Image (cartoon, helix red, strand yellow):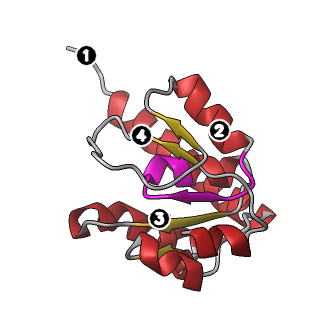
C-alpha cells in the first residue's frame, strides 16, 4: 500500500473500521478510526482525496460527492453488489479483487454522466416503491 500511497502524492491514509467485521490487524495508516458515527463516516468520504473501499455504500457516496474511488472485494460473497454497481454505472475497471491489485488499477473520477444515471435510477426506485406500497386497503 505504500507504493499506492506514493503514487497518489503521499497523502495521509485513514482507515475506518467496518462495524460488520472485526479486523484484528488493520492496514498501515496514519489514522485509524475504530468507531465512526454515520455523520463522521460521511464526512470522511466527503472530504477525502481518493477513496479506496470495499463498501458498496461508500462507493455510492463517492459517486454522490464526486470523489475519485477504487473499489475492491476480498471475499467472493461480497463481490456481487460491487460488480453489479460497476456494471450498472460502467466502471468495471475500477473494481478489483483485492487490495494488492489497487496499485495496478485505475481509479474512477465520477462525472456528470454518473449523476444522470443515478438520478434515473433514483426515479425508477421511487416509482417502484410508490407502486409497491400503494395498494387499496380493505
- Which quarter of the rendering shows the N terminus? bottom right
Q: Nearer the viewer, mark 4 or mark 1?
A: 4
Going from N to C along the chain, the mark reached first, 1 or 2, is 2
**Residue 118 horizontal side relative to residue 128, left or right:** right
Regarding mark 4 in the picture, which secondary structure is present there?
loop
Q: From the top left corner, tell me how far across and down residue 93 is, in percent.
A: 55, 82
Res 94 label: none
Going from N to C along the chain, the mark reached first, 1 or 3, is 3
Regarding mark 2 in the picture, which secondary structure is present there?
helix
Report the residue marked by disc 1.
137
- Which quarter of the rendering shows the C terminus? top left
Q: Write down the region rendered in magenta.
A: 48-59
Q: Residues within 10 Å of mark 1 (few under 14, many from 20)?
A: few
Regarding mark 1 in the picture, which secondary structure is present there?
loop
Regarding mark 3 in the picture, which secondary structure is present there?
helix
Report the residue marked by disc 2.
44
Q: Is residue 110 magenta?
A: no
Callout 2–callout 4 Cβ contact below 8 Å: no
Q: CA distance from mark 1 to mark 3?
A: 36 Å
| Count of marks placed on residues | 4
Q: CA distance from mark 2 to mark 4?
A: 12 Å
Q: From the top left corner, tell me how far across and down residue 29 is, in percent.
A: 55, 51
Whether 63 is drawn above or below 138: the answer is below
Callout 3–callout 2 Cβ contact below 8 Å: no
> Residue 80 occupies which quadrant of the picture?
bottom left
Going from N to C along the chain, the mark reached first, 3 or 2, is 2
Residue farthest to the bottom, as pictured: 104
Amino acid at each position: 500500500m505504500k507504493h499506492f500511497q506514493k503514487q497518489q502524492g503521499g497523502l495521509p491514509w485513514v482507515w475506518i473500521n467496518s462495524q460488520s467485521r472485526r479486523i484484528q490487524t488493520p492496514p498501515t495508516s496514519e489514522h485509524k478510526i475504530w468507531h465512526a458515527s454515520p455523520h463522521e463516516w460521511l464526512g470522511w468520504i466527503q472530504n477525502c482525496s481518493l477513496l479506496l473501499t470495499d463498501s458498496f455504500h461508500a462507493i455510492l457516496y463517492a459517486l454522490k460527492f464526486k470523489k475519485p474511488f477504487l473499489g475492491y472485494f476480498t471475499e467472493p460473497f461480497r463481490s456481487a453488489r460491487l460488480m453489479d454497481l460497476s456494471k450498472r454505472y460502467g466502471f468495471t475497471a475500477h473494481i478489483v479483487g483485492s487490495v494488492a491489485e489497487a496499485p495496478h488499477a485505475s481509479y474512477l473520477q465520477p462525472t456528470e454522466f454518473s449523476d444522470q444515471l443515478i438520478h434515473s435510477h433514483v426515479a425508477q426506485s421511487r416509482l417502484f416503491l410508490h407502486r409497491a406500497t400503494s395498494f387499496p386497503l380493505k
